Image (spheres, rainbow, N blue to C red):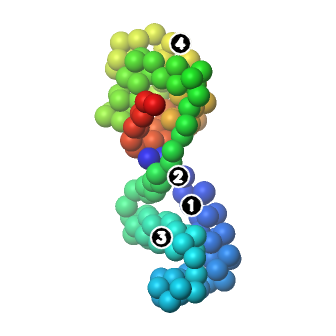
Amino acid sequence: MKRIPMGKVNDRVTELEAKYTGALEEIPDLFADGLLGPQAFEDYVEWMGMVHSLRAYREGEDFDYFTEEVLELDLKQSSKLTPRRMELLDQISKNRATSINDLAEKIGRDVKNVYNDLKTLEGLGFVSLVKEGRRLVPELLVQEVTILLW
């Protein structure tokens, strides 16, 4: 599962509302009557989830919107998911790090190696390095990783 930032959620809600000219609430009935196809219903489900997340945020909760995404990695990309990098993902999921230095200290690794591993994970779409002042803070973009071997 991948976390979608609030700005992208807002953009997608606007896009869907324009596509269906504000008639999104009517989609389930139109779909049940056979007047709309499955894509419209999928759009409706996506829109409802996003609207609920935005509403919860406005009411004071943290903003979290996740979507299921299948990421097919080729052999070269999947070889980048080393045990050390998976350990980083696990550590970030359990304890919020305030910086790359903080993360490196928590797991007892060299800062430069942790930074390089985070850059690789960022390139694969698993983490984001967010600038907070002079620090880079690693944030997970995924909530769950399932690896299927074929």
Q: CA distance from mark 4 to mark 3?
A: 43 Å
Q: CA distance from mark 2 to mark 1?
A: 7 Å
Left-right relation of 62 to 70: left
In this view, the residue in front, 20 or 78, is 78
Q: Secondary structure at mark 1?
A: helix
| Residue tagged 2 | 4
Q: Secondary structure at mark 3?
A: helix
Can you say whether 52 is above or below 109 in the image?
A: below
Check disc 3 and give the amino acid type: Val
Q: Earlier in the sequence, mark 2 or mark 3?
A: 2
Q: Nearer the viewer, mark 4 or mark 1?
A: 1
Q: Secondary structure at mark 2?
A: loop
| Residue tagged 4 | 112
Q: Earlier in the sequence, mark 2 or mark 1?
A: 2
**Residue 136 appears at what percent x and percent y?**
54, 30
Can you say whether 69 is above or below 41 in the image?
A: above
Check disc 2 and give the amino acid type: Ile
Q: Nearer the viewer, mark 2 or mark 3?
A: 3
Seen as rendered, the residue at the extreme front is 150
Are dots 4 and 3 in contact, CB under 8 Å?
no
Q: Quadrant of residue 12?
A: bottom right
Q: Earlier in the sequence, mark 2 or mark 4?
A: 2
Check disc 4 and give the amino acid type: Lys
Q: Which mark is residue 133?
A: none
Q: CA distance from mark 4 to mark 1?
A: 34 Å
Q: CA distance from mark 2 to mark 3?
A: 16 Å
Q: Earlier in the sequence, mark 4 or mark 1?
A: 1
Q: Earlier in the sequence, mark 3 or mark 1?
A: 1
Q: Nearer the viewer, mark 2 or mark 4?
A: 2
| Residue tagged 1 | 9
| Residue tagged 3 | 45
Are dots 2 and 1 in contact, CB under 8 Å?
yes
